[in-house]
Amino acid sequence: MNGNRYFGDLREYLDALDRRSKLYRWQCPINKDTELMPLMRLQYRGLPDDERQAFLFENVVDAKQYQYEIRVATGVYGVSRQVLALGMGCEGADEIYEKWRYALAHQSAPVVVNRGIVQETVIQGAELKKHGLNQLPAPVEEPGFSGGIRVTAPFITRDPETGIPNVGMYSGFFLSPDTLLATIAPTHHAMLYHHSAARRRKEPLPVAIVLGALPDIVYVAAANLPYGVEELAVAGGIRGRPIEMVRCKTIDLEVPADAEIVIEGEMSTEETAQEVPFSDYPGYLMWERSRWPVVKVKAITYRSKALFTAVLVGLPPSESNGISRTCREMMLYNFLKYSCNLPEVLEVCCPEMGGGWNWWVIRMRKSHDSKPWQALHAASGMSACSKIIIVVDEDIDPKDPEMVMWALSFAMQPHRDVHVVTGRVPLLDPSALSLMTRPEDRSFPPPVGCSGMLIDATRKGPYAPVGLPKQVFMERALEIWQKQELSPLRLRTPWYGYPLGLWTAEDDKLADRVTNGDYYPANNQPKETQRG
């Protein structure tokens, strides 16, 4: 990427990943039904975040050895923090939060153009009914457990009454060459507002599923922006230019002109089908077998030599988790720091194993004892889905679970610093769903929904110093280590000690005596051996 210029299309973005050694191209035949996602899983279960790569599978076959013309790219949006930063147009992960704020403040509304490369090929009619979705190399995500195949991608809908658009990151399961199942939670905007409005009008809801979009569109789709904020305008803020949109061939919607593939369809307000076993962000297969709206596919459009983007869901870490957790971090950081007047907030972390929804850690500089609780209640009010929210001091790395555990162990008392709140929504949390038998209970179970826990794990008052050598001694040790060319270190905060209030100038003098070789404090020595 040159300067601040954002990418022209997904292929230019992949080239940028390749130049940074963040893309691996698979030339050998890979079976999408048995091998493709297991290869991604090896990476997620066996490599740290900064060593993971996006994969481009250029020779894709299925279990029957059918050879696909369409290639598969996976991990391109969220395989690692660095990949996601590049997708945001940032060189480093530390730039993401403020880039998001910039995009919100500099929204650029999309524009409609006459033609788009995403419509170079159009499949509809008899060809669609016969082949349709079968031509898309959607991989099996959990071979041996998956009950079908799905796409996870931005879904574009529009409120048929108000015209308000929505772009959400949802999943669709293939039912036949020209039908799929839309699994969109009842609390998400596409169902809560758009589908319910279409149901009142007794008409289907047009929906466009966008595959191979640039990362900015995926991130705004996953960010759960407030209803009425146009996601594509925020994407334009990330991109630094309006998103060019082209009108769909068979439905009254517009889609990104530079995307790789678009599935055009109509979501029924009457016909439903039962879901099949699948895995999602909690890391377990979903057993409910709920019924969801059926989407009748009207057309599939794609560009020449198209790329199918497969987003791995399921047990964290996964790509969907990497995307959703970072998007929620950006949203919460901006909300607390700027909307809630909390400049003390320094960082927000949604740990991978919390699935991006259930566990938030907020690092802040505590200017007043009330500030942690202001942050906790504000964060709780931002989303009905968060389960555990923890505030820690500024010297605690929220990305390091062991340091968060240290704060929980020694900076809080449960009876004083923990509040349980009700009225929460479980989404797919099996700890709630496994206790419910009625389908109507599952999004907000009686009598008062699910619950969440707010924890102030900041220190209350002065503490003794952190029990490590002072910075000057650790830095000297680091110099020696590096001169000896020992194994590279990945130092974790804290890696040197510092005072936290309970430390005096006299204590410093005593410590200085010891480091100078005078080990016995004068006032503690026996009189007969006391030194001047």
Image (spheres, grey):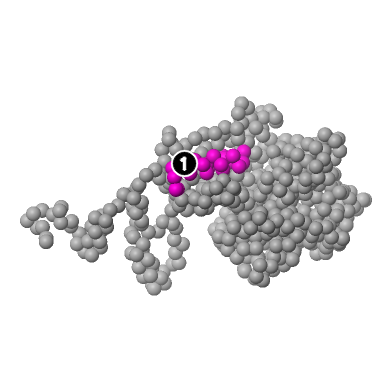
- Residue bearing mark 1: 370
Q: Toward which corner of the image does residue 498 lie, by quadrant?
A: bottom left
The residue that appears at 47% across and 53% down in the rendered structure is 397
Q: In which quadrant of the rendered image does the C terminus lie?
A: bottom left
Q: Nearer the viewer, residue 110 or 434?
A: 110
Establish if 2 lies above or below 420.
below
Disc 1 is placed on an element classified as loop
Q: Toward which corner of the image does residue 256 lie, by quadrant?
A: bottom right
Q: Position of residue 388 (x, y in %)?
A: 53, 41
- Work out which residue is located at the far left of the displayed protein and give it: 528
The segment highlighted magenta reads: 366-389
Q: Nearer the viewer, residue 72 or 515?
A: 515
The residue that appears at 83% across and 50% down in the rendered structure is 253
Q: Nearer the viewer, residue 261 or 112?
A: 112
Is 387 in the magenta?
yes
Relative horizontal placement of residue 226, taking residue 130 as reference (left or right): left
Is 445 in the magenta?
no
The residue that appears at 45% across and 48% down in the rendered structure is 366
Q: Position of residue 122 (x, y in %)?
A: 88, 57
Q: In which quadrant of the rendered image does the N terminus lie?
A: bottom right
The residue that appears at 60% across and 32% down in the rendered structure is 423
* Badge 1 amino acid: Ser
Relative horizontal placement of residue 465, taking residue 268 as reference (left or right): left
Q: Toward which corner of the image does residue 468 lie, by quadrant?
A: bottom left
